[in-house]
Amino acid sequence: MITGIGHIAITASDFEASIAFYRDVLDLPEAFRADRENGSPWMAYVKTGAADFIEILGGKGATA
């Protein structure tokens, strides 16, 4: 029986639009984000529960 999922990861073709959707439309808080050394977005976590997150991967090379 599955009782929870710690996090799932998705790749977003438009990183900022995806963050805005989860934050502004679904009202999920952004927990944290990390950028690459060149400043381009790499990933962000949005909080979906007490210990549950959606990890959004974005920017150039998001699937790498």
Image: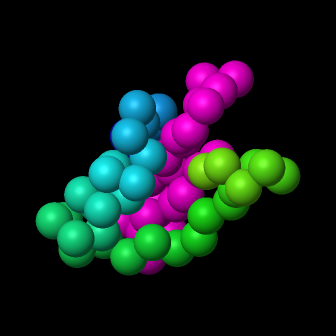
Name the quadrant of the N terminus: top left
In front of the other: 60 or 49: 60
The number of numbered discs placed on residues in the rendered structure image is 0
Left or right of 55? Residue 49 is left
**Residue bounds of the magenta highlight:** 42-64
Q: Which residue is nearer to you in this view: 9 or 11?
A: 11
Reply yes or no: does residue 59 show up in magenta.
yes
Residue at 55% across, 57% down: 44
Q: Residue 8, percent across and down? A: 47, 43
Residue 60 can be seen in this image: yes
Measured along the vertical axis of the image, is residue 59 above or below residue 39?
Answer: above
Q: In which quadrant will I find the C terminus?
A: top right
Judge by depth and name the residue closer to the eye, 64 or 51: 64
**Left or right: residue 39 compared with residue 53:** right
Q: Looking at the picture, does residue 9 appear above or below residue 4?
A: above
Residue at point 61%, 31% (across, down): 60
Q: Residue at x 22, y 71 (%)?
A: 24
Residue visible at 30% across and 69% down in the picture: 23
Q: Is residue 8 visible?
A: no
Q: Quadrant of residue 10?
A: top left
